[in-house]
Amino acid sequence: MKGTEPDEEQLVRRTAKGDRAAFEELYRRTSPWLAVRLRRRCADEQIVAEVMQETYLAVWRAAGAFAGSAVGGSAVGWLWTIAARRLVDAFRRRAKFAQPLPVAETAVSPAAEDEALAGAVGDHVGDALRRLAPELRQVLQAMVLDGLTVRETAVLLGVPEGTVKTRARRARIAMREALS
């Protein structure tokens, strides 16, 4: 029976046609993962809840714009891109009113996304990534994995743009040295 279940891309395509059951199934499958990933970047549960709501509202409205595997994308990647951008928007709104945003505590165990990245890129590259300082790894994660700009990464991490550029350069140098 598992082989006949629609994958996330099919659920997005059905959602684009107004299929509420497909949308609900997409939400059921992806919301726990998305909430965890957002909480790793923001400790404010209210902001996480707002971003979740905004993300799924955007998915419902924009499912027809999803290009998917035709352009090398994935449904969960598309979903994360929407959520990451909504989180940056939330940080910007908060910054506009000058309220400090609680930053998520660093986890003791490696994040699932770090493990997945390390597994996807091979042992040698994965080892090099794990040896990076956490602040360098965060910049690489935001800019490379999440596809954020320097400005968006700066807002997300709560550091100046120049710091993001410096950390990105240091991370590239460290990765180059580790892989040579």
Image (spheres, helix red, strand yellow):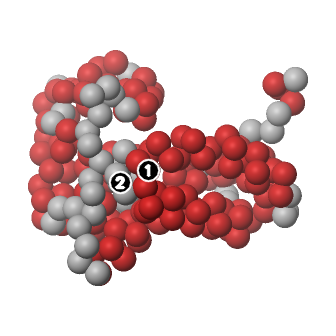
Please tell me which residue lies in front, 83 or 168. 83
Residue 95 shown left or right of residue 136 in the figure: right
SS state under label 2: loop
Q: Is residue 172 visible?
A: no
Please state the horizontal and vertical placement of residue 136, each as a whole percent of the image.
19, 43
Please state the horizontal and vertical placement of residue 155, each as a whole percent of the image.
28, 66
Residue 118: quadrant of the picture? top left
Q: What residue is shown at x 19% (from left), y 27% (from top)?
A: 131
Q: Residues within 10 Å of mark 1 (few under 14, many from 20)?
A: many
Amino acid type shown at disc 2: Cys
Q: Residue furthest bottom?
A: 97
**Compared with residue 160, is residue 111 higher up or lower down, i.e. above or below?**
above
Q: Quadrant of the C terminus?
A: top left
Which residue does the numbered mark 2 point to in the structure image?
A: 42
Q: What residue is shown at x 22% (from left), y 62% (from top)?
A: 158
**Compared with residue 61, is residue 5 higher up or lower down, i.e. above or below?**
above
Which residue does the numbered mark 1 point to in the structure image?
A: 38
Q: Residue furthest top?
A: 123
Q: What residue is shown at x 64% (from left), y 48% (from top)?
A: 75
Residue 28: quadrant of the picture? top right
Residue 145 shown left or right of residue 158 in the figure: right
Please tell me which residue lies in front, 29 or 5. 29
